[in-house]
Amino acid sequence: MKLGYNEIMITSMYFNDINDFINLEMGVKRFRGNIERFHFNPIPLNKYSRKLFTNIETFHIYNKYDEIFNDGKIFKKVIWYKVSYSTYLQEKEQGNECKNIEYTEEDRKSYGNTIPPEVKSLGYQCFSGCDSLASINIPTTINEIGDCCFIGCSSLKSINIPSSINELGNDCFYYCISLKSINIDNIQFISQERIFMNEPVLINCEIPENLEIINGKNICKKDINEFIIPSSITKLGYKCFYGCESLKSINIPSSIIKIGDCCFRYCSSLKSINIPSSISKIGNYCFNYCTSLKSINIPSSITSFGYGCFYECGCEEELKKNKRIPRKCFEL
């Protein structure tokens, strides 16, 4: 198959830096002028690379500290990093677009308890101390609930957690003393201490102290040893099994392609684990303080090891003999 101008332009949208664009045009004569065809910048720019993208009309800002340009034909900005709802409204007035909008505590105080449909995440302590908040609708546009989001909402009686949520912050329901009922669209497992939910990314939250009902039924808490990861799960989220002290063994199915940072940290009873070849990276502090871990299979597919992933691990000394595993894995 011979790639044409349109095909190579689509492909180059996924290049990592300006050198990839330059190498393409220098290496393949018929693709010279590819950069000039872009009407937006597919990568962050600096003063040098800006001169090469001469026909930009829409300027994409990928990170908070990206260099911003207002020269030439630019008439619109697209902001990809997280911004507050109030910032989004200001940018919208100027004709700009925001892709990652967070509802902050300041936003909530200004605009109320109804979450706007444009919002993608709820920020740190967003609804903290809302004594009169009895219920709340979390739209399916929300994918993240920040740390301490509903802390101290003493009148909150029920809440629905949609399957779109792929990250739940620490203590997000702390001191919600009236919270007795939760509806969870995609519940996987209820242990003695926490609720595991969502797919394809498995996440969890602590069970609120006074919770009695989940999805209209009385809670049936199970021992964490009975946990089976469904084959529909593809990723284990950040701190997924963090501090599960009773977990002795677990089977990770081949459907799993990623294990998040701190996933099994402080699983002090975990004795053995098999990592399937579908995984290429072990996250930071993943098996940190797994003091009872005596057996772990590390397939050749693992090409990246996180910091401290085996620090104070039961098989630390044995793993140090494996030349593939870098020293950083045994340090904090």
Image (tube, rainbow, N blue to C red):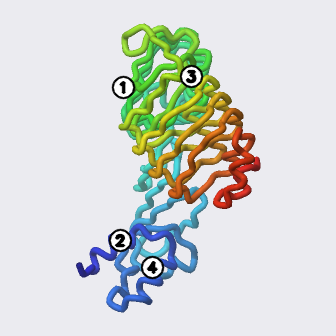
Of the two numbered discs 2 and 1 on the same chain, state the one appearing first in sequence: 2
Question: What SS does tag 4 mark?
Answer: helix
Q: Look at label 2 and name its amino acid.
A: Thr
Q: Quadrant of the N terminus?
A: bottom left
In the rendered structure, find residue 11 and report the number of the disc placed on it. Answer: 2
Residue 4: quarter of image: bottom left
Question: How far apart are labels 4 and 3 at the CA level?
Answer: 47 Å
Q: Tell which tag, 4 or 3, sits nearer the viewer.
A: 3
Picture layout, residue 245 above or below residue 258: above
Question: How far apart are labels 4 and 2 at the CA level?
Answer: 11 Å
Q: Which residue is mark 4?
A: 21
Question: How far apart are labels 4 and 1 at the CA level?
Answer: 44 Å
Crowd class of label 4 (few under 14; some 14 to 19; many from 20; radius 10 Å): some
Q: Residue at x 56, y 46 (%)?
A: 297
Of the two numbered discs 3 and 1 on the same chain, state the one appearing first in sequence: 1
Q: Residue at x 68, y 50 (%)?
A: 319
Left/right placement of residue 274 relative to residue 139 reads right
Question: How far apart are labels 3 and 2 at the CA level?
Answer: 43 Å
Crowd class of label 2 (few under 14; some 14 to 19; many from 20; radius 10 Å): few
Q: Which residue is mark 1?
A: 185
How far from the left and from the top, in percent, is residue 163?
Answer: 38, 32
In the rendered structure, find residue 206 and report the number of the disc placed on it. Answer: 3
Picture layout, residue 4 above or below residue 278: below
Question: How far apart are labels 3 and 1 at the CA level?
Answer: 17 Å
